[in-house]
Image (cartoon, grey):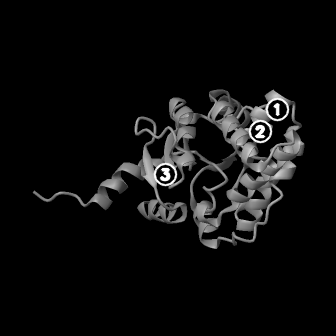
Amino acid sequence: MNLPLKSEIDKQGQAHLLEKDVWVFDLDNTLYPADADLFPQIDVLMGAYISRLLTVDLVEAKKIQKGFFLSHGTTLKGLMETYNVDPQHFMSFVHDIDLTPIDENQELNGYLEALPGQKYVFTNGSVDHASRVLNKLGIEENFAGVFDISHSHYIPKPNPKAYDYFIDYFSIDPKKAVMVEDMARNLAPAHDRGMSTIWLKTDNDWGKMGHSKNFIHHEIDNLTLWLKGLLDIKG
Protein backbone atom coordinates (compact mmCIF):
# COMPACT_ATOMS: atom_id res chain seq x y z
CA MET A 1 0.00 0.00 0.00
CA ASN A 2 1.36 3.41 -0.98
CA LEU A 3 1.15 5.87 1.91
CA PRO A 4 0.82 9.60 1.15
CA LEU A 5 3.83 11.80 1.80
CA LYS A 6 3.64 14.02 4.89
CA SER A 7 3.66 17.10 2.62
CA GLU A 8 0.60 15.77 0.82
CA ILE A 9 -1.15 15.09 4.15
CA ASP A 10 -0.40 18.67 5.21
CA LYS A 11 -1.79 20.01 1.93
CA GLN A 12 -4.97 17.98 2.33
CA GLY A 13 -5.34 19.26 5.88
CA GLN A 14 -4.89 22.91 4.95
CA ALA A 15 -6.60 23.21 1.56
CA HIS A 16 -9.89 24.10 3.27
CA LEU A 17 -8.30 27.32 4.53
CA LEU A 18 -8.43 28.72 1.00
CA GLU A 19 -12.21 28.59 1.21
CA LYS A 20 -12.25 31.07 4.11
CA ASP A 21 -13.46 34.65 3.59
CA VAL A 22 -11.49 36.44 6.31
CA TRP A 23 -7.84 36.41 7.36
CA VAL A 24 -6.90 37.87 10.73
CA PHE A 25 -3.25 38.60 11.47
CA ASP A 26 -1.54 39.67 14.63
CA LEU A 27 1.05 42.40 14.00
CA ASP A 28 4.22 42.22 16.08
CA ASN A 29 6.40 39.13 15.57
CA THR A 30 3.83 37.81 13.09
CA LEU A 31 3.80 39.99 9.98
CA TYR A 32 7.52 40.49 10.48
CA PRO A 33 9.92 37.90 11.95
CA ALA A 34 10.63 37.91 15.66
CA ASP A 35 14.38 38.03 14.99
CA ALA A 36 13.93 41.61 13.75
CA ASP A 37 13.89 42.35 17.49
CA LEU A 38 11.42 45.22 17.32
CA PHE A 39 9.53 44.09 20.39
CA PRO A 40 12.63 44.20 22.62
CA GLN A 41 12.77 47.92 21.80
CA ILE A 42 9.16 48.29 22.96
CA ASP A 43 9.95 46.19 26.02
CA VAL A 44 12.79 48.51 27.02
CA LEU A 45 10.61 51.58 26.57
CA MET A 46 7.85 50.06 28.72
CA GLY A 47 10.38 49.54 31.49
CA ALA A 48 11.61 53.13 31.15
CA TYR A 49 8.03 54.45 31.24
CA ILE A 50 7.24 52.56 34.45
CA SER A 51 10.56 53.58 36.00
CA ARG A 52 9.78 57.26 35.44
CA LEU A 53 6.11 56.96 36.40
CA LEU A 54 6.70 55.19 39.69
CA THR A 55 10.20 56.47 40.46
CA VAL A 56 11.66 52.97 40.71
CA ASP A 57 14.81 51.47 39.22
CA LEU A 58 14.69 49.52 35.97
CA VAL A 59 14.90 46.15 37.72
CA GLU A 60 11.81 46.88 39.79
CA ALA A 61 10.09 48.42 36.76
CA LYS A 62 10.64 45.18 34.83
CA LYS A 63 9.05 43.15 37.63
CA ILE A 64 6.01 45.43 37.63
CA GLN A 65 5.81 45.33 33.84
CA LYS A 66 5.83 41.54 33.60
CA GLY A 67 3.51 41.22 36.57
CA PHE A 68 0.90 43.35 34.84
CA PHE A 69 1.32 41.35 31.62
CA LEU A 70 0.53 38.15 33.49
CA SER A 71 -2.32 39.53 35.60
CA HIS A 72 -4.00 41.89 33.11
CA GLY A 73 -3.08 40.59 29.64
CA THR A 74 -1.01 43.68 28.82
CA THR A 75 1.24 46.00 30.78
CA LEU A 76 -0.93 48.89 29.62
CA LYS A 77 -4.12 47.43 31.08
CA GLY A 78 -2.44 46.98 34.44
CA LEU A 79 -1.12 50.55 34.42
CA MET A 80 -4.53 51.93 33.46
CA GLU A 81 -6.38 50.08 36.20
CA THR A 82 -3.77 50.59 38.91
CA TYR A 83 -2.35 54.04 38.16
CA ASN A 84 -4.91 55.60 35.81
CA VAL A 85 -2.31 55.95 33.04
CA ASP A 86 -3.39 57.69 29.82
CA PRO A 87 -3.25 54.88 27.24
CA GLN A 88 -2.52 57.15 24.29
CA HIS A 89 0.42 58.74 26.09
CA PHE A 90 1.77 55.30 27.01
CA MET A 91 1.47 53.88 23.50
CA SER A 92 3.02 56.95 21.86
CA PHE A 93 6.00 56.56 24.19
CA VAL A 94 6.58 52.82 23.85
CA HIS A 95 6.01 52.65 20.09
CA ASP A 96 8.57 55.35 19.31
CA ILE A 97 10.97 52.73 17.98
CA ASP A 98 13.48 52.32 15.16
CA LEU A 99 11.96 50.31 12.27
CA THR A 100 15.27 49.99 10.44
CA PRO A 101 15.53 46.23 11.25
CA ILE A 102 12.56 45.44 9.01
CA ASP A 103 12.58 45.85 5.24
CA GLU A 104 9.97 45.96 2.52
CA ASN A 105 8.76 42.41 1.92
CA GLN A 106 7.58 42.23 -1.67
CA GLU A 107 7.24 38.45 -1.51
CA LEU A 108 4.87 38.60 1.46
CA ASN A 109 2.98 41.44 -0.20
CA GLY A 110 2.38 39.29 -3.28
CA TYR A 111 1.13 36.33 -1.28
CA LEU A 112 -1.20 38.49 0.79
CA GLU A 113 -2.58 40.01 -2.40
CA ALA A 114 -3.20 36.53 -3.83
CA LEU A 115 -4.86 35.26 -0.68
CA PRO A 116 -8.65 35.10 -1.14
CA GLY A 117 -10.88 37.14 1.14
CA GLN A 118 -10.53 40.19 3.36
CA LYS A 119 -7.46 40.69 5.57
CA TYR A 120 -7.38 42.45 8.93
CA VAL A 121 -4.82 43.21 11.61
CA PHE A 122 -5.88 42.46 15.18
CA THR A 123 -3.33 43.91 17.61
CA ASN A 124 -2.91 44.81 21.25
CA GLY A 125 -0.89 47.79 20.01
CA SER A 126 -2.05 51.00 18.37
CA VAL A 127 -3.29 51.85 14.88
CA ASP A 128 -0.42 54.31 14.47
CA HIS A 129 2.18 51.65 15.29
CA ALA A 130 0.48 49.15 12.98
CA SER A 131 0.35 51.67 10.14
CA ARG A 132 4.07 52.43 10.49
CA VAL A 133 4.99 48.75 10.46
CA LEU A 134 2.69 47.81 7.57
CA ASN A 135 3.96 50.75 5.54
CA LYS A 136 7.59 49.82 6.21
CA LEU A 137 6.89 46.24 5.11
CA GLY A 138 5.09 47.50 2.02
CA ILE A 139 1.97 45.44 2.72
CA GLU A 140 -0.48 48.05 4.05
CA GLU A 141 -2.60 48.07 0.90
CA ASN A 142 -3.66 44.46 1.47
CA PHE A 143 -5.52 45.13 4.71
CA ALA A 144 -9.14 46.17 4.89
CA GLY A 145 -8.70 47.43 8.43
CA VAL A 146 -6.71 47.49 11.65
CA PHE A 147 -8.36 46.68 14.97
CA ASP A 148 -6.25 48.02 17.80
CA ILE A 149 -6.65 47.96 21.56
CA SER A 150 -8.58 51.24 21.62
CA HIS A 151 -11.32 49.63 19.50
CA SER A 152 -11.81 47.01 22.22
CA HIS A 153 -12.02 49.70 24.92
CA TYR A 154 -8.49 48.72 26.00
CA ILE A 155 -9.49 45.15 26.73
CA PRO A 156 -6.58 43.11 25.32
CA LYS A 157 -6.22 39.72 23.73
CA PRO A 158 -6.66 37.05 25.03
CA ASN A 159 -9.69 38.42 26.89
CA PRO A 160 -12.69 36.95 25.02
CA LYS A 161 -14.46 40.33 24.99
CA ALA A 162 -11.76 41.72 22.70
CA TYR A 163 -12.59 39.06 20.10
CA ASP A 164 -16.29 39.79 20.33
CA TYR A 165 -15.58 43.49 19.78
CA PHE A 166 -13.41 42.60 16.78
CA ILE A 167 -16.03 40.33 15.24
CA ASP A 168 -18.77 42.93 15.71
CA TYR A 169 -16.62 45.82 14.48
CA PHE A 170 -15.97 44.23 11.10
CA SER A 171 -19.22 42.19 10.99
CA ILE A 172 -17.40 38.95 10.23
CA ASP A 173 -18.50 35.35 10.55
CA PRO A 174 -15.78 33.73 12.71
CA LYS A 175 -16.50 30.33 11.18
CA LYS A 176 -15.30 31.74 7.86
CA ALA A 177 -12.15 33.25 9.37
CA VAL A 178 -8.52 32.23 9.88
CA MET A 179 -6.39 33.78 12.63
CA VAL A 180 -2.58 33.84 12.53
CA GLU A 181 -0.81 34.70 15.78
CA ASP A 182 2.60 34.24 17.42
CA MET A 183 1.26 34.12 20.99
CA ALA A 184 -0.33 30.72 21.47
CA ARG A 185 -2.74 31.69 24.24
CA ASN A 186 -4.27 34.38 22.04
CA LEU A 187 -5.64 31.68 19.74
CA ALA A 188 -7.86 30.00 22.35
CA PRO A 189 -10.72 32.57 22.17
CA ALA A 190 -10.45 32.62 18.36
CA HIS A 191 -10.89 28.85 18.31
CA ASP A 192 -13.79 29.04 20.74
CA ARG A 193 -15.58 31.39 18.34
CA GLY A 194 -15.10 29.07 15.39
CA MET A 195 -12.00 30.49 13.69
CA SER A 196 -9.33 28.30 12.16
CA THR A 197 -6.14 28.96 14.11
CA ILE A 198 -2.52 29.17 12.96
CA TRP A 199 0.29 29.46 15.49
CA LEU A 200 3.51 31.02 14.24
CA LYS A 201 5.94 29.11 16.42
CA THR A 202 8.40 30.98 18.59
CA ASP A 203 11.22 30.21 21.00
CA ASN A 204 9.96 32.98 23.25
CA ASP A 205 8.47 31.77 26.55
CA TRP A 206 5.71 34.41 26.30
CA GLY A 207 4.78 33.11 22.85
CA LYS A 208 4.56 29.51 24.05
CA MET A 209 2.52 30.38 27.12
CA GLY A 210 -0.76 28.47 27.27
CA HIS A 211 0.00 26.44 24.14
CA SER A 212 -2.43 23.59 23.52
CA LYS A 213 -3.25 21.51 20.47
CA ASN A 214 -6.85 21.65 21.68
CA PHE A 215 -7.20 25.10 20.12
CA ILE A 216 -4.32 25.32 17.63
CA HIS A 217 -5.13 23.77 14.27
CA HIS A 218 -1.81 24.36 12.49
CA GLU A 219 1.70 25.35 13.51
CA ILE A 220 4.06 27.14 11.13
CA ASP A 221 7.66 28.36 11.22
CA ASN A 222 7.66 31.14 8.65
CA LEU A 223 4.61 33.14 7.53
CA THR A 224 5.87 34.02 4.05
CA LEU A 225 6.94 30.46 3.18
CA TRP A 226 3.74 29.03 4.64
CA LEU A 227 1.56 31.35 2.54
CA LYS A 228 3.58 30.38 -0.54
CA GLY A 229 2.94 26.69 0.15
CA LEU A 230 -0.72 27.29 0.86
CA LEU A 231 -1.22 29.19 -2.39
CA ASP A 232 0.62 26.46 -4.28
CA ILE A 233 -2.25 24.16 -3.31
CA LYS A 234 -4.57 26.52 -5.14
CA GLY A 235 -2.34 26.33 -8.20
Crowd around label 3: few <14 · some 14–19 · many ≥20 (10 Å): some
- Quadrant containing the N terminus in the rendered view: bottom left
Residue type of the residue flagged with mark 2: Leu
- Marks 3 and 2, Cα distance to the nearest angstrom? 36 Å
Marks 3 and 1: which is nearer the front? 1
**Secondary element at image label 1:** helix
Q: Earlier in the sequence, mark 3 or mark 1?
A: 3
CB of mark 1 within 8 Å of CB of mark 2? Answer: yes
- SS of the residue under disc 2: helix
Question: Which of the marked residues, 3 or 2, is nearer the chain's N terminus?
Answer: 3
Question: Within the image, what quadrant is residue 67 found in?
Answer: top right
Vertical relation: 227 (above or below) 153: below
Observer-side mark, 3 or 2, equals 2
Residue identified by numbered label 3 = 18
Q: Which residue is mark 1?
A: 80
Residue 138 in view of the camera: no
Q: Secondary structure at mark 3?
A: helix
Residue type at mark 1: give it: Met
Q: Residues within 10 Å of mark 2 (few under 14, many from 20)?
A: many
- Mark 1 burial class by Cα count in 10 Å: few <14, some 14-19, many 20+: some
The picture quadrant where one finds residue 129 is bottom right
Disc 2 designates what residue? 76
Q: Is residue 26 left or right of residue 126?
A: left
Residue 227, x across and y down, in percent: 51, 61
**Residue under the image location 64 percent in, 66 percent down:** 36
Q: Position of residue 71 (x, y in %)?
A: 65, 31
Residue name at image x 52 percent, y 34 percent: 188
Q: List the single residue furthest toward the left.
A: 1
